[in-house]
Every structure is written in structure tokens, then in C-alpha cells.
Amino acid sequence: MFEAAELGRRLSKADYREAEPELRARLLGAQRRARAAGLPVLLLITGVAGAGKGELVNRLHEWLDSRNVRTHVFWDETDEEKQRPRWWRYWRAMPAAGEIGILFGGWYARLIEDARHGRLGEDGIEGELDRIRQVEQMLINGGALLVKFWLHLPAEEQARRVEARRKDPKSHWRMAPETAHEANHYDAFVELATRVVRETDTGEAPWFLIEATDRPFRDLTVGKTLRRAIDTRLEAGNGPAPTKVSHAPALPEAETARRTIVDHVDADLVLSRDDYKKHKRSLDGTLNRLGWEGFTARHPVVAVFEGWDAAGKGGAIRRLTEALDARLYNVIPIAEPTDEEAAHHYLWRFWRQLPRDGYWTIFDRSWYGRVLVERVEGFASQPEWARAYHEINTFEEQLAEHGVTLLKFWLNITPEEQLQRFEARQETPYKQHKITDDDWRNREKWDNYKAAVNEMVIRTSTEYAPWHIIPANDKRYARIEVMRIAAEAVKRDVKAKKKAADKG
Amino acid sequence: MFEAAELGRRLSKADYREAEPELRARLLGAQRRARAAGLPVLLLITGVAGAGKGELVNRLHEWLDSRNVRTHVFWDETDEEKQRPRWWRYWRAMPAAGEIGILFGGWYARLIEDARHGRLGEDGIEGELDRIRQVEQMLINGGALLVKFWLHLPAEEQARRVEARRKDPKSHWRMAPETAHEANHYDAFVELATRVVRETDTGEAPWFLIEATDRPFRDLTVGKTLRRAIDTRLEAGNGPAPTKVSHAPALPEAETARRTIVDHVDADLVLSRDDYKKHKRSLDGTLNRLGWEGFTARHPVVAVFEGWDAAGKGGAIRRLTEALDARLYNVIPIAEPTDEEAAHHYLWRFWRQLPRDGYWTIFDRSWYGRVLVERVEGFASQPEWARAYHEINTFEEQLAEHGVTLLKFWLNITPEEQLQRFEARQETPYKQHKITDDDWRNREKWDNYKAAVNEMVIRTSTEYAPWHIIPANDKRYARIEVMRIAAEAVKRDVKAKKKAADKG
């Protein structure tokens, strides 16, 4: 595959000098249009060692308006990164709308390095390639432009460069630390790279192979390609709207399908005050102990609370947090995104809140807003919310792979119970702030929400992150259920983690 | 001093139950008003071990609308934190406008711990107390409400609690890891705490001593105090505007003072093309090597570029970055703040961009905007910009203490040279984006800017962070000067760091 980048293409200095000013002007123009259009541009620069990735990026910085360019490098993984799912560090580096993010090596450098050092089995490599395809597709669907450059050098040329640098006392510092090692294993590297590049060369996120032997050719080609990619993307933006995503209904649209999972919840489950107190006291102790055990074992927990308005999310969260030490958790309310959040992929704001190992993050509403309120109210288009089920599953799978205990609660009440609570809230001074006109409007769309909840539960209940539907007409029953399920899951996972640690 | 918190005040359960609903309603009301007014509330909860800081924060979470409350704990310092100035971790935790940030121990826990373990000498303790007073004053001047609670227990009560918890297999997990140690050194702890509390008990940031023996009394007192602090602050906000800061002019307002530092810059310094090339090549090598040496030695660099419009900041930055490996630096342009940035203290956006050890952050414009454009254009009030000199010096002092090489460049051109450049820019296609109406408007205020620059240089040139005034009428001369100064400073600091490391 890389033969295509070994044709010996060159550019004379004179030709380069002639072409550069025009390219600069056009590239700057493209950058400015991208900024105006709010297009996030993700530039992945990778390739063989010695190909001049650093030089190239310096050149791009020179050509572009560097005010909107950020460069990210992923050498040493910090402990804050290690203590979160594998991709967290990449999400930190995602460019906002209108910005250009240059990711050195991107998510490819680690895959190749891990594979070469035998840290990933065959399944691991396949899994990670699959992950990359899915995430890239998701970013593109989310509106980003992804431009991937692979800089290639023939073996002799690489060897020559590495040797020349090694000998030159003034310039050998230019070599990044890992260069020399890589150069000594050229064939194995290229074999692996061929596979990685081929398997991630998709229609939406194609690779651009760049012949990097001749520097002027390399730089000018990358510059022109980037310019064209931005302009092509911006033109397409004015084309027809994206087609609706094929989306088989979870249940047939028939009369008999009107009865959903939600309708099957037993609304009559209650807990007496005495039983509540007994269970509560016991679970308080258990959860507090588990919080500390999890902290010591560096086990992270993410809890998601969704439910009907007035279903008691806040109350259930408070009962859970009362048991935990306040130093071990944070409650993240999900309402309007900030402008930094709105300028990123919709999952970015959740990635940035993921807890470090040992801590809990409790989301009061969550990424499920995409397939609930955003779907029903039309804030997300049909393709957007229909894609979200898969995107969410992929996201949660990554949490699970990192060992996060992911708890998802749907607090379910009947419409009659909701009405009663709305009315009660309006009468209690310190609860009045909890009831807004929105709540009454949402109530009128009960059936639409019910369908959305049903589909959400069906499509996103996975073995690694099942939904727990909590009958919540009785607050006491619901609160104890939430605590019981949380304790059970965390206990199981912490135990498994300790066991694995003892073995390892 | 703590005797005042050993009076044995208690609250009967009945009284507590009676008072709680009203307090909740009033506290929620205060929180909502603070949110509407965009008031950031910083709650520092500290005190003796076993006093129930965790319980108290749980209670506050229950009373408040937890959607706008974030809790921060500062146990283990992560490597990302260690590799930045000491206070970086606290700046990460600063609440935005309208939010409540609860900081466990705040910046006091570390001071007390370091002092107790002999990690700070007498000078170190004094220095840190001084730092705390300055930062708190700065936060308050910046618009934050700071509420500091010290939870106190008499010695016998603390011993009793620690013992009771130790014996109880179910509840001893509630003890944070450091509790037991602290309890064994009560007298020494309280002696130190007395000093710390007394010396940081200022009019703007007073301590509230809370008798923590009786839980209902403790919680209710904290709740009431917090409510009152918020409301008092909001009422004061409608009072008279803050008085102008006493601000002795840096130079007398006389005819003879019209000639400023800026006028003393020799505008005629030039560098021939050949000399430029020679110096450039040599400095490219030196800086590249120093970049890698600094990376290996984990030495951080912060460079600040300020200057007249069209003085060549961008060009000088590019020449510097061309020499550096693109993986080691980021250029941060300072323009409009994002809404998250605008919702914090004006220095917050700079703190968040500080490099990790081993890397460079290059600011294209900087915190000096406060005393330049914001002063001249009236975006900052007189008290705001007049205070800023000291605030900036305090900020930069912290960078210096961490060992950051801080480079500050003022690129100076004459008004005639600026005019020529403006005109030239309008004729070059890829430079047209660089010239806006603002530039022409700023030009008309040349004398005002000159006075601001002059005062900035006088007031913020410190031994740890001197200004470098770069004659920039000749671009070649300016670029080489910047590179030369940067190389010299980094070389000196990296050498000193290595020497210290060898000794240590």
C-alpha cells in the first residue's frame, strides 16, 4: 500500500517558492471560512519516525492563523489520564467548533505501539480498530472534519535520516525519544501500519498518504490537501440534508405495542416507614463502607438518574449521597450546555466530567437527554437521535472496559402520581422552584416520552450497563431500591477488582 | 481563640426540627438570588479532624439545590497538579458566577499539614499566609463571596469520637485516612490552627468558628451563617460603587514625564539579512536543543508577547516556534473569553492554560490586557486595572516559585512604522485578515496606550519576571532579540535546575 508513496516525487525550491504564497492565501481563506461556519477540524498527523511530523506541524503553524490551532501530543500518560477510560485523553484534545486541533499520532500511535509491544492480542487489535472506526464515524456525524495524514518514508531514507541526526551533535535533539527504536524495526512497523491504515480508511475518514522524502513536496501536498478537504466539506454543507438513518422500530407500530416496558412497572410497590428506616440505616453503612473500599481499591462509579419530571431523582440522589462521604462524589446536573460544551460533540461534556478512579460521578439527567427530551422536543434531528443509541452504547462500553461501575436508573411514576406531586410542589415554599411551565408542557407529551423511554431501555440495556427501572410512586420504595442496587453492583465490582489485583 | 467555640452550645432535636424548614427555604432563596446575580460563592470547610466536615457537606447538599454546588477535595496531588504552580489545583476548583464551590480544607489544609510536618520553615509559613491573604483579597475584589468555616471540637470530644469510630466496625470507614494521626497531636494542631486562623481573619474574608460538638447546632449554625453571608453580600452589591484605589502615578503628570520608557527605545537598530540568517540558524539549533533539554529536565516555560498592533508579535512567535519542536509548545491567543472564562476571575483563563513541566505555553497577548486595552478602552474600571498590577505580580511570583521561566516581551515600534505596516497589510492578500477597524481606532489613542505601557513596565518588571522591551521597527532585529533572550533565560534556568537536582 505504501508503494504509492515511494514514487520519488519532489518539488524544486523554485517551484515551492512560487506555489507557497498562493497556497498560504487559499489555506488561510479556508481556515477563515471553517471558523465562520463553526466547523471543528481534526488533523491527525502520523506516520513513520523521521518523516518530519514536527517540521510539518511547524510549517502548518506558519501558514495558518495560529490563533485557532492547538497541538496535542500523547507521550506520557498522566495519572489523571490513566485513571479514566482509554479515550479520555483524546476527548480532552477535541477541537471546538471553528478550531483546528492537530493531534500528533492521534489514537493511532498508541494502537500501533501497544500492538508492536505485544500489549494487545489479535482480538485487542481488532477491537481497537473497530473502536476507532466507530468513534471517527461518530465525530464526523457530529459535524467534525477529520483529516488523517500518514507520512511515509522508504526504509533507506528513514535509516539515512536517523543516522544523519545521530551523528550531528547540533540536530540530534530534534529526534523525539522514541524515534531510534522505531527505525530499527522498519519492516514490522510498516506491516502493522499497512493493516491499520487499510482497515481505518473509510469513505468518511480517508487516509492521505504523503510521500515525505522531499520536504517541500511533503509540506505543500499536506497544505493543499488540507485546503481542499476543508473547502469540499464546507461546500457539501450546503448540499442536501443528511438522509434519515434507517431505524427499525423497537416495537411494531401497532395497537398492541402501546403497552410498553414502562407500563409493566408495578406501581403499587410500597415500603412502610419502619421498613424504610431499617433498610436505610443498613444501606447507609454498607454504601459508606463500599465508598471507602472503592476509594482504596481505586474503583470508579458513574451513576445516571433519569425519570419522569417529579419522579424523585433529586431525592433518590440525596439519599444515595447521604450515605457516601461527600469527599468521594460529585453530582453533575445536566441542563443547558455552556458555550464551550455546545461547541463540541454532544458527548464531550460527559467525558469531561468522568470521575477519576476511586470517585463517584452522579449525573442528574445525562447523555440520555439526546434520545429523550431532544428527541421528543425536536432539538435533535431524527438522524441525530437515531444514531445516538449506538453512540451511547459505544461510550458506555468504554466505561465498562475501564472497569467503571455504571448504574442507570429510570425512576418511573404514573401520570396520576405526577399530577399529585406537581400540585404538592406548588404548595411547599422551598419546592416551588422545582416546578416550571416546562414541566406542565412535558406532561402533555406523556405518550411521546413513554415511547422514547421504551425504546431507550430496549436499545441501551446492555450486559455491561443495564437499565434499572425503579417503581417510584412510593418514594421510600424507590430510594431503597436505588441504594440496594448501587450497593450490590459496587460490591460485586470492587470484589472482582480486588480478586484480579490479588492474582495479578 | 477557640475557647469561643467550646461553650457547649446545643440544639434540641425539637428545636432543630422546628427551625430547619424555615432555614431551608431561606437558604434556597439566597442561593437562587446568588445565582441570578451571578455571584460565585466559595465555601471553605475546614477544622479539626472528626468534627464532621463530611456530614456537614452532606447536609448542605441536602438543603441547597445541588445543581449548582460542586465539592472539591485535595487529598492526593496528581502529577498534572504537581507539575504546575502550587495553587493551580485550587484555581481548577474555582466556582463560576452563580455557582457554589465547596472546598474541603481549601488552601488551609495543605498549609497546616506542611507546617506540621516541618516542610515549611518559619519564612515559608509567613510567606504562605501572606499569599493566602493576597489571593483571598483578589478573589473578593474579583466579585466572589468567600465564606470560611472552621469547625472546632474540644480535645476530649475529638478523642471520644475517634475512639468510638475506631471501635465500631460499621462506622470506622467514615474516618478519612488522615483523621487518626491528627487526633493524636491535638495540642500542636490547635496551636498552629490558632495562628493560621488569626492571621487570615480579615475584614473581607472573616472566619466563622463553629462549635461542632452538637451536630444539630453545627449544621444549623453553618446554614444560617451561609444564608446571611450571601444576603449581606447581595445587599451590599446595591450599595455605593467601590472607591477608587489609591494609585500613585508612576511618573508625575508633568511635561517632562511625557517622555516614557517606550520613547527611549532605539528605533534604528537593524540587522542585515546576512547577519539575520547567521544568527537565526545558530539560535534555531540552540533553542531546539534547549527545548529538549528542558523537556528532559521537566522545566516549564511561559512566554508572553505584547506590543503595538502590527509590531510583529505573530512573526516573532512563529520564528520562536519554528525553532522549537511542535510537540513541546502551544500558542494561546487571547481574544474574547468564552462564557466559562467570563464567569470566572479574569486570571482564571490564564491559570487553566499553564503548561505542565517540560512544556512551553506562548501567550499571544495575555493577562496584561487588563492594564492595556481594558484600561484604555474602559472595559475595566479604575479600581480593577489599578489593582491588577499587584495581582499580576502575585500571579507571576507563583510561576517563578514553581521554577517557570517567564519571558515577557513588549514589541515596540514607532507610530510611523505602524502606519506603513497597516498600509502594507491591506495590500497583501493573505495579510488582509490581520487588519481591522479596531486597529485604526487604537492607533488614534497612541498616547493613552503609551502611558499605559509605561506604567505597566514600571510596575510589573520584577526581578523574577522582567520586561524585555524589544525595538521592533526592524523585524529581523526584533525576532533575533526575542530568540536570543529566550535562549539565554532558558539555558540559565535549566542549568540551575540540573545543578539543584544533582545536589538534591
Image (cartoon, coloured by chain):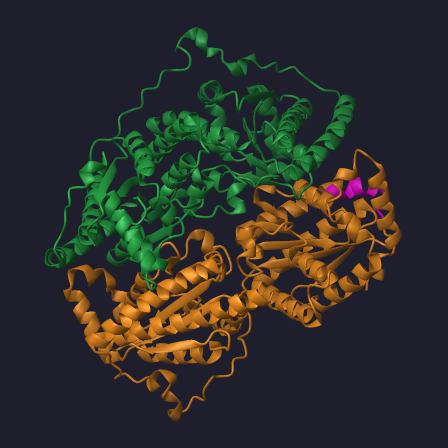
Chain colours: A green, B orange
Residue B51 visible within the image? no
Name the residue located 34 percent from the left edge and 31 percent from the top edge: A133
Part of the protein shown in magenta: B10-20
Q: Does the segment drawn in magenta span residue A129?
A: no
| Residue B145 in the image, given as x and y percentages of width and height | 61, 58
B302 sits left or right of A202 in the view:
right
Check the image and report above or below for A267 versus B129.
above
| Residue B360 in the image, given as x and y percentages of width and height | 42, 60
Name the residue located 74 percent from the left edge and 49 percent from the top edge: B178
| Residue A21 in the image, given as x and y percentages of width and height | 15, 58
| Residue A345 in the image, given as x and y percentages of width and height | 39, 39
Q: Quadrant of the N terminus of chain A?
A: top left
Residue A182 visible within the image? yes
B421 sits left or right of A478 in the view:
left
Name the residue located 39 percent from the left edge and 70 percent from the top edge: B486
Q: Quadrant of the C terminus of chain A?
A: top right
Q: Nearer the viewer, residue B400 or A469?
A: B400
Farthest residue, direction top: A256
**Circle count:** 0
Q: Nearer the viewer, residue B303 or B293?
A: B293
Q: Quadrant of residue B117?
A: bottom right
Check the image and report above or below for A387 versus A104.
above
Q: Main secondary structure of the magenta part?
A: helix
A377 sits left or right of B206 in the view:
left
Q: Nearer the viewer, residue B407 or A176?
A: A176
Q: Nearer the viewer, residue A483 or B448?
A: A483
Check the image and report above or below for B68 versus A317.
below
Check the image and report above or below for B368 versus A193.
below
B439 sits left or right of A499 in the view:
left
